[in-house]
Image: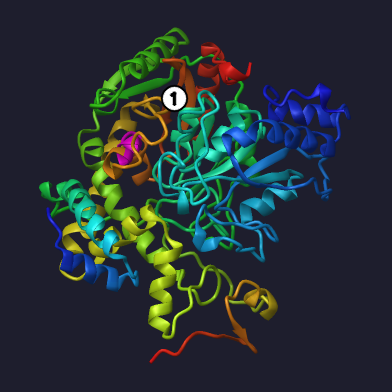
Amino acid sequence: MSAVVDTLRLTAEEANGLLARREVTAAELHEAYLAAIAERDPELHCYLRTLPYEAGEEPNGGGVPIALKDVISTKGVETTAGSRMLEGYVPVFDATVAERCRAAGLSVLGKTNTDEFAMGSSTENSAFGPSRNPWDPERVPGGSGGGSAAAVSAGLAPWALGSDTGGSIKQPSALCGNVGLRPTYGTVSRYGVVAFASSLDQIGPVARNVRDCALLLSIIAGKDECDSTTVELPEPVRLPEREDLTGLRIGVPKEMNEAEGIEPGVAAAVARALELARELGAEVGDCELPRSVEYGLACYYLIAPAEASSNLARYDGVRYGLRVDADRFSEMVERTRDAGFGDEPKRRIMLGTYALSAGYYDAFYGQAQKVRTVIAREHAAAFEQFDVLVSPTSPTVAFKLGEKAANPLAMYLSDLLTIPSCMAGLPGLNVPCGLSEGLPVGLQLIGPQFSENRLFEVGHALERALGFDPVPERLR
Amino acid sequence: MAITREEVLHVAKLARLELTEDEVERLTHELGAILEAVGKVAELDLSDVPPTSHPLDLVNAWRDDEPRPSLGLDDAFANAPQREADLFRVPPTT
């Protein structure tokens, strides 16, 4: 049955075609991915659990399978956010994005691995063990959404959903060689998604190419009355078709392209992509974001932990999740939280609590919020001259498991280039732009708020011209 | 910027975390290094800059105040560590 389905190469758009022409059934397609998972996931550990095919209501004859990051609540299916704190937690409702996927006929293949509470850049912080990079299993797939990104690259899902606070969609997509979008803040509902830092968290698609990424965004985007930060899109999502970039103005922020720590192979691949963009008709010019990069990381590591310390206060052993018994209530709460949270959530809860505590609030949290304004203003000024901004997504290619695990600050630097635009609520698209040392390099495209259609057009044209093969060499 | 052991214990108390002795020692060291890095934001004079708490220019999001079904009791208690009748049971507070 599934002999006709090459899950390594199949795009969601092609899968839709197979289903529409009745060359394959939704159940067969789902089974083909489960077979691929059974074959390759023991090594890669992209999935925390898989699900059998469930015949749903499919008014559109849908049925393309999808993987969901395990921070997304799925009714009746354990949702752990990669944490012991939520081991065995079975949501009684679907997240809005899960509901929209099901309503569009997508069948859920399973829940993908993540750094605990989406805190990390490698999935090594998952309480259930790390995922591995399909290009080289000795290396990390990035994080926190490493499970989703690795699953798409290894042909274990045609597409997937991730969540992004400071780079958790874009960075794993860069390290695994696929397309990931962090949408404009407010575009996609977070209802039913395990909260990390609420002024930053966004849900977004991970796919094998830009058109699939756009298609998946069109399924999940739009106002949701259960998340009052969401807004209606100013224009519908369009599947990109343009093949040239005539008239497009690309800005190259000096600080984001010359930052210390960018590997030469990464810089070279980005430079080649810019050269191609010129050949396709784009004007490429230099610009500056002087304080966004220099102060972005510090700003993020105050605001995100502060919000996390507040969001994670709900894990108290009372209503759901882990409880460690004790004779008194306060001891029960403190022991539960010590046992349930791993090292990284504890670090961030401590850091955030400190930054919000009396005497430090203004100097840390208050000051970081002002830096956030500076970052937004710098980006707005750059967009007066340019349509999109370009940089590497990650300063490095995928690093080895264990290489940064012992040094939190070194790990935090993985997100140096993805963080500034997140602070400003801007959309960012990762498009693979070549290999360095045999590993994928990601190109980051940043646009003004609600410019997703523009990012898709630029990404699509570049993707065609670059001709990057998203299938890991060792799996071809 | 250094953080003292006493401050770590104080913050752990605020955060309701019962840390082990090893964790207190490690966090004192790690938080000191991280605070030194993030303390960089203090270099900027931003007295004239307003803070940003939310990246979208949204002012209020109202909806009509209409009653509608909410989570039933069995669903609300489905993941409770300990239920007693229609209450969450916890150890004594005093």
Q: Residue under mark 1: which chain is it in?
A: A
Residue A236 appears in the figure: no
With respect to residue A221, does A414 lie above or below? above
**x%, y% of residue B57?**
39, 53
Check the image and report above or below for B68 versus A453. Answer: below
Q: Which residue is mark 1?
A: A442
Residue A335 pos. (x, y %):
40, 72
Name the residue nearer the viewer: A310 or B66: A310
Quadrant occupied by the N terminus of chain A = top right
Image coloring type: rainbow
Which residue is at 45% across, 35% downward?
A: A142
Asked whether A469 or A216 is in front, the reply is A469
| Furthest residue in direction bottom, as rendered | B94
Magenta residues?
A411-417
Left or right: A102, with A363 as reference point = right
Q: Tell me the amino acid under the disc marked 1.
A: Gly
Residue reaching furthest to the top: A279
Disc tally is 1
Q: From this viewpoint, is residue A223 visible?
A: yes
Q: Nearer the viewer, residue A144 or B41?
A: A144
Q: Residue at x 44, y 25 (%)?
A: A442
Give the SS element for disc 1. Answer: strand
Q: Residues within 10 Å of mark 1 (few under 14, many from 20)?
A: many
Q: Most prominent secondary structure in the magenta stretch?
A: helix
Q: Residue at x 54, y 18 (%)?
A: A463
Residue B41, how many percent across, how many down?
Answer: 17, 48
On the image, the x and y values in percent for residue A42 come to 63, 36
Quarter in which the C terminus of chain A is drawn = top right
- Res. A394 image quadrant: top left
Horizontally, residue A181 falls left or right of residue A38, namely: left
Magenta segment includes A370 = no
